[in-house]
Image: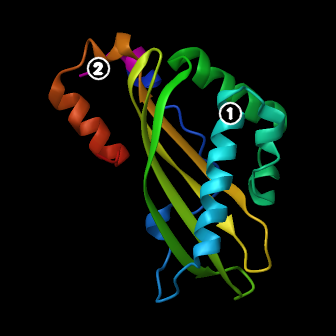
Amino acid sequence: MLPRAAALLLLLVLTLWAPSPRALAQDSWQPTQQLNEQLAAATAQFWALLDARRFTEAYGQLAPGLQNQLTLEQFTDLMTTITEQGGAVSARRHGRVTWYRKPDPNGVPTSFAAVDFLGTMERAELYCGYLLWHVPDEGGIGVLRVEQNFIPDQVRAKMTDEEVRKMTSAWRCMR
C-alpha cells in the first residue's frame, strides 16, 4: 500500500463536469481532414500555452461549459500546482484521437474528440492523460476536460513495478 500522502499526490486531475470519453456514443460519422487538422492545431496551441504558463490564454480555449464551472483563478491554481509538483514538461507525444458523436441536451448532434498523450516532466518520469474537446457543428472548438496524471519521481521510487502498472492501467495511459 502507498502512504496516504503519496496516494494524494498520485492523481492530479482537472475533471469537472464533462462526459468521460467512454460514456459517449459512437456512430458512423467521421471527421473531415480539415476538422482533424483544426483539432491538431488547437491541441498544440493549448499545450504550448500551458507549458509557457500563459494560463489566461489557455483558459480562453476552454469550452463555455467548463468555464462556467471553473474560474480563471481556480484553473490557474490547478495548473500551477501541477507544474510545481511535476516540474516543466520535458516531452509530450500525442497518441490516439478518438472522435465521438452525441446529441446535446436539445437533441442536436455534436462532436467530441479525445486526444490521448504520454510524456515526462522534470520530476515525473510518467505523465499521461487526455484532452476532451467539444467540437460543435456550428464551429468553434473548446476543451471540455483536461486530465493530467503523473507520479512524482520521489513517490515512484517507493512504489513497486506492479503498483505502477496498476496505476497506469487505471489511468488508461497509452503505451
Of badges 1 and 2, the one in the foreground is 1
Image: magenta residue range: 1-6
| Amino acid under disc 1 | Leu
Secondary structure beneath dot 2 equals loop
Numbered label attached to residue 81: none
116 over 31 or under it: above or below: above
Between 16 and 33, the one nearer to me in the picture: 33
Earlier-in-chain disc, 1 versus 2: 2
Packing grade of label 2 (10 A; few <14, some 14-19, many >=20) is few
Residue 111 at what x, y percent from top left?
62, 75
| Amino acid under disc 2 | Leu
Is residue 4 highlighted in magenta? yes
16 over 63 or under it: above or below: above
Res 82 quadrant in image: top right
Residue positioned 75% across, 51% down in the render: 62
Position of the N terminus, as image quadrant, is top left
Between 104 and 123, the one nearer to me in the picture: 123
Numbered label attached to residue 2: 2
Residue 71 at what x, y percent from top left?
82, 40
Secondary structure beneath dot 1 equals helix
- Left or right: 137 in relation to 130: right
Q: Which residue is mark 1?
A: 50
Residue 75 at what x, y percent from top left?
74, 35
- Left or right: 106 in relation to 13: right
Packing grade of label 1 (10 A; few <14, some 14-19, many >=20) is many
- Left or right: 144 in relation to 138: left
Residue positioned 74% across, 53% down in the render: 66
Res 57 quadrant in image: top right
Residue 143 at what x, y percent from top left?
68, 54
Q: CA distance from mark 1 to mark 2?
A: 30 Å
Residue positioned 16% across, 31% down in the render: 162
